[in-house]
Image (cartoon, rainbow, N blue to C red):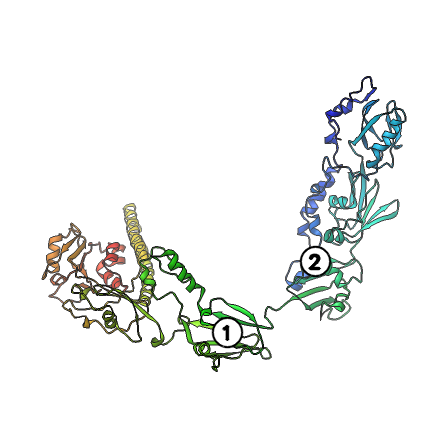
Amino acid sequence: MAVGDSSLSSTGVSKAPRITNQSLNQNSTADNAAFNSRSAAEDAHYFVKNKKQERSEFQNFVEYATGKQLPLFGEEFFSRPPSSFAPLQDTPIPSDYVLGAGDEVLIRAWGSVDIDYRATVDRNGLINIPTIGAVPMVGVKAGEADAVIKSSIGKLYRDVAVSVSFGRLRAITVYVVGQARKPGSYTVSGFSTLVTALLVSGGPNLTGSMRNVQVKRQGKIVGSLDLYSFIAKGDKSHDVKLQDGDTIYIPAAAGYVALTGKVNVPAIYELKSANESVASILDLAGGVPVVADPRRAFLERIDPNKSQPRTVEEFSLNQAGLTKTFKNGDLLTVASITPDFSNAVTLRGNVNQALRVPFKAGMRIRDLIPNREALITRASVRRQNGSVIHGVNGDIDDKGLIKENAASISANIGNLIDDVNWEYAVIERVDRATLSVSLLPFNLGRAMDNPESEDNLRLQAGDAVTVFSQNDIQVPVAKRKVFARVEGEVNVPGVYQMGPGETIQSLIAKAGGTTSNAYLFGTEFYREKVRQEQQLNLEKAVRRLESQSRTENAKAAANQSGAVDAQVIALKLKAEQEASAQVLAKMRELKATGRISFGLAANDENFDKLPALKLENGDQLVIPSRPDFVHVFGAVNQEASIIWRKGMTVEKYLADAGPTSEADMDGVFVLRPNGTVASSAGRGWFSSINSVEIMPGDSIVVPDRLNKETPYKVFTNGLKDWAQILSGFGLGAAAIKTLK
C-alpha cells in the first residue's frame, strides 16, 4: 500500500495505542527516487553526446577499405542521455532487494495496536519501533519485510494487521575503472545493477570491452557480463546487483572484426575471445537475409608480419565455413545472390501482362503465348472499359486513361486495341559461356496460326520473348490500319476504315459523296503527325522571339542611358517590355491544329480538284457549308461579321468597317478558308491587298500602326508577318485574333 493512504489513518479499534512520528504527515512519494550524482550524469551526457564524433582506427580502416562507415555494434545502446535510464520516482522495489543501513521503512499496523511510523535502518541493521523495540532488518529482502515486522509486533500484540512500504532508499557508491568512457565514482540507488550503472557512466570507450565487463567486490570478481548477449538477445541473466563499494572494471577489447555486404546488421563487432567462430558473430548480427549468397563469402585478413599484410580468401557459409575462426582486424563480406533465374522464360512488350514463367523441356512460343487474347494490352483494356464507363466524351491518353474536355468520342473510334506487329517478334538469348546475346526473330502471326509452323520456335531457359506493337516498330503502309473521319457536308459523316493506299476521294465516296451545300474552298484536313511537327515548330518560334525580345529590350535600354528624361524613358521601356511579354504569354497558349492547307483556288468547285493524298490513321476531313459572312477585326471602328456579297473587295469591306486612325493599312492581310494568307507582300508595285476579291468565310485583319523606334515594333514586326508564320502552324483567324 502507498504511504499516506487515508484508509489507514484509523483502525476502527477503540482505545488502541497509537505510535506515530511527525515525518509521516508528509507524502514520501517524492522521496522514493534514485540517487545519482548530478555532476557525474552531466559529464557522462557530454561524452555520450559527442560520442558519434569519435571513431576508432579500425573504423577508419574499414571505411577506407570498403567506402562505408560502419558503427560499432552496441554503441547505440549508450547513445541516449543517461537520465533516460536512471531509475524513476515511484519505481517498484524489487522483492529481492536486500535492505541495508540508510533504507527507510514505513510501517502501519492496526488492530490491537495502532502504528503509523517511519523508521530508518541504522548502521547495525536495526530499526527501533516504540513500544515494540529493535527489529533486525539487515539482510532482509523487501518482499520479506512484512512478515519480519509482523512477527516482531506479534510477540507483544495479537490480532494485528501490518503493512510495510518503503520511503527513501539508501544510496551506494560504485567505481567505474579501466577502459571506461568516463571513469570515476558514481552514486546510484541501492537497487542498481551493473547495466544501469554502465548506462549512467556512458559505457566503454572506443577500445573498451562490451563483452567482459566485470564487477569486483572486496578484491574478488563476483560477476561478469557480456553486453552483446543482452543487446542482441535480451539475455540479462548475468546482470549483477551492485553493493556499496563495488568496482566495475572494463578491460580492453580482445579485438574487432567487420561484417559488410548482405548481413542483417552490418557493423564492427568485438571478439569475445581469440578463437570466436564466424557462426557466433553472424548470430549476433541477426544472420544473413534471404538475398545473401551463402556460397560466396570473402574474408579479408591483416597479417602485419608479411610484406603485403592484406590477403583475401573466398569460402562458403556451410558447416565448415561457419566454424572458421576470426582474427583481430578481419573483414567479412557476404555477397548477394544474382537476380537472374536459372529456369525462367520471360514474356514482355505489347502483351496483356509481362510474365516470368518456369521453363519446361520442349517449351515453344505457343506454350508461352497460348492465344492472341494474351496480347491485348492493359492500356487497351482500360480504353475499352473507359468507353463503357464514361459513355461519351473522352480522348484516351498514352496510359489508356480518359482525358478531360475531349472533343468527341468519334476521335477514339478504331483505337481500342494496340495493333500487334504480327510480322516481327524476337527472342533474346544469352550464351552464358561467352556472355554474347543473339536475336532470333520470328513471324508471330504464323506461330499463332499454326503450332506446327517453323516460327513456333523452341525456347531455352533464360530466353526473353518480346512482342511489339505497330507503334513500336512501324510496319509498311499497306499493313497499317487506317481509320479516317469525315464530317460536315457529306451524305453520311462518320469514321471509316480505309484500305491501303486509299485517298481523300475514296473517303468522300464511302461517305456517300458531298451534299449540295459543300464548300470546297473551305475544306479542312487535319493529321496528327503534322500537328506534332507544327507544335514543335511553334514552340521553337516562341523561344526565338523570346530571345529576340530580350536582345532588343537590352539594346533600347543601353541606347537611352544617360538621357535627361531618364525616368520617363524607363517607364516607356517598361511598358514596351510588358507588352512584348503579354504577346509571348499568349503565344505560349497557342496550340497547333495539324491542318494541311490544300491551297485551292476560289473558283474551284469540283472535289476532284482535291489532292490524291493517301490517308493515314486518325486523319480528319471537314467539309463545311458555304458561310454567309466575312469577318473583319483589328484596328477598325467596329469588329463585325459582314454579310458576304459576290464581287466585294477588301477595300469595300474596310470602308464599311471603318479603319481607325492607328490602323496600319499597309499591313492588312486576309486569312482565307483554304488555310492560306493573302497580303500586299509580293503583289507588285501596282497591286495591293485592297483589290483582292473576298470569298465567303474570309477574315480581314487590320493591324495597329506601331512606333518603328520601339523594341516592341522590332519584336513583332507587325501582325502581317506573323500571319505568314502562324499559318504555317495550322493556326487560323481565331489565333490571330487572340494575339491582337
Specify few, some or many for label 2: CA neighbours under 10 Å numbering under 14, 14-19, or 20 or more.
some
Specify few, some or many for label 1: CA neighbours under 10 Å numbering under 14, 14-19, or 20 or more.
many
Identify the residue under disc 2: 286
In the rendered image, is residue 121 in sight? yes
Q: From the viewer's side, name the closer residue of 313 and 305.
A: 313
The image quarter containing residue 388 is: bottom left
The image quarter containing residue 160 is: top right
Q: Earlier in the sequence, mark 1 or mark 2?
A: 2
Q: From the viewer's side, name the closer residue of 352 and 213.
A: 352
Identity of the residue drawn at 80% across and 53% down: 212
- Which secondary structure lies at badge 1? strand
Q: Amino acid at mark 2?
A: Gly
Q: Amino acid at mark 1?
A: Val
Task: Report whether 114 appears left or right of 478.
Answer: right
- Which secondary structure lies at badge 2? loop
Labels 1, 2: front one: 1
Rendered image: mark on residue 465: 1
Q: From the viewer's side, name the closer residue of 689 and 520.
A: 520
In the rendered image, is residue 350 in sight? no
Residue 513 percent coordinates (x, y): 20, 69
The image quarter containing residue 629 is: bottom left
